[in-house]
Image: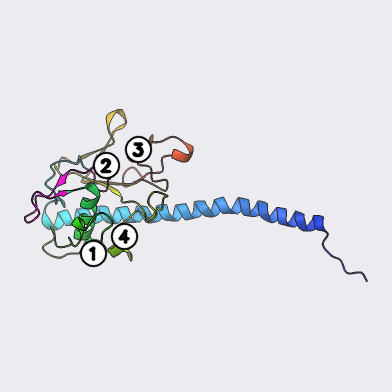
Amino acid sequence: MKKQRFTLIELLTVIAIIAVLMGLLLPAIGKIKEAGKKTKAKAQMKSLELAIKNYEATYGVLPNLFGETDDTYPLGDPTDNNYTSHISGYTGTAYSSIEAYDILMQVLAKVDLANPPATAQSANKSGMGNDRNIPFIDAPAKFITDGYRDPFATTANPTGSRYIIKIDFNYDNVITVGSGASAITVHGSTAIYSCGVNGNDNKGLSNGGASGINRNDDITTWGE
């Protein structure tokens, strides 16, 4: 009996079918990974929110290391560069917003960043503002090298971006997110959001960004 073999056309057909299936599966796998990162980001933001509230419950004040009286300067926002420390021993030292963020993470975790991604100025600050040496949040495995970061990786920030944290430093239970006509009001002591997988800061607003490449995929601790 003559042995049957695949013809060239049959082989090409099978390869084409496999290619089509792979084309259908890859986007689905990408969406599953993105959903996993989103879940992780939400969990981390909630942990940060709880840590800040526990700090307030312990010390009677929000973790304001820089003498700010309102929520004008969101921690983690690279566009803000005019923090000034009023802590004894650091008076007059100017910090950027991302340096302030790295310092706050060290205070909450009670773990030093020996070589923080911002500058050496924000290194080894876990002793600031937490005299009782209480760890309010667990430090991730890569905390010492990367700090506490949003797990979404972007082209601009391959290790992940910092979360944007706004704190009600004037204790009026009102935090304004965004500006102008699109601004929204969040009631509470803390508002945190992630810039999402595309790394675009849409201020956590539902109408921020266009559809498609610049879609708004900010993740927030409010309204969800």
Q: Which residue is mark 1?
A: 114
Q: Which residue is mark 3?
A: 205
Which of the 4 image quarters holds residue 40?
A: bottom left
Q: Residues within 10 Å of mark 4 (few under 14, many from 20)?
A: some
First reached walking from the N terminus: tag 3 or tag 1: 1
The region drawn magenta spans: 74-94
The residue positioned 47% from the left and 40% from the top of the image is: 213
Q: Which mark is residue 144?
A: none
The residue positioned 11% from the left and 46% from the top of the image is: 67
First reached walking from the N terminus: tag 3 or tag 2: 2
Q: Which residue is mark 2?
A: 79
Q: Residues within 10 Å of mark 3 (few under 14, many from 20)?
A: some
The residue positioned 45% from the left and 52% from the top of the image is: 35
Q: Residue furthest top?
A: 181
Task: Identify the secondary structure beneath mark 2.
Answer: loop
The answer to whether marks 2 and 1 mark residues whose Cβ atoms lie closer than 8 Å is no
Which of the 4 image quarters holds residue 203?
A: top left
Q: Residue furthest right?
A: 1
